[in-house]
Image (cartoon, rainbow, N blue to C red):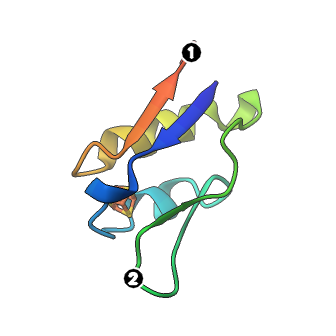
Amino acid sequence: MKIYVSHDRCRGAGQCALTAPEIFDQSDDDGTVVLLNSEPPPELHVRAIRAAGLCPNSVIRIVDAT
Ligand code: SF4
């Protein structure tokens, strides 16, 4: 699994950091997403996919979500 984020679309809603705090954090400056781990281990894949689905602006893109 590889995760990409499009910062320009992030509204700082924070659903990603709440859902998968091992993978996503929020900037102290503007609340936008900070990608902590772009290649999370298998045990975190379900949460990464859930976070991508919850993001209101489709900021999070996951490749090889098998
Ligand atoms: S849920 Fe989406 S819009 Fe909200 S902080 Fe995370 S990436 Fe940004």
Give x and y (percent) for residue 42.
Answer: 73, 27
Give x and y (percent) for residue 50.
Answer: 43, 39
38 on left or right of 25: right
| Image label count | 2
* Residue at point 52%, 86% (across, down): 28
Where is 22 relative to 50, above or below?
A: below
Q: Quadrant of ligand 1?
A: bottom left
* Mark carried by residue 64: 1
Give x and y (percent) for residue 4.
Answer: 51, 39
Residue that lies at the very extreme toward the right in this rendered image? 41
Q: In the rendered image, which quarter contains the N terminus?
A: top right
Query: Mark 2 to mark 1: distance in Å?
Result: 30 Å
Binning the other alpha carbons within 10 Å of mark 1 as few (below 14), some (14 to 19) or many (20 upward) gives: few
Give x and y (percent) for residue 15.
Answer: 38, 60
Q: Secondary structure at mark 1?
A: loop
Amino acid carrying label 1: it is: Asp
Where is 27 relative to 54, above or below?
A: below
Q: Nearer the viewer, mark 2 or mark 1?
A: 2
Q: Earlier in the sequence, mark 2 or mark 1?
A: 2
In the foreground, 8 or 33: 8
* Residue at point 47%, 33% (across, down): 49
Where is 55 relative to 39, above or below?
A: below
In the foreground, 35 or 47: 35
26 on left or right of 1: left
Q: Residue 38 falls in which quadrant of the image?
A: top right
* Residue at point 77%, 33% (across, down): 41
Q: Which residue is mark 2?
A: 30
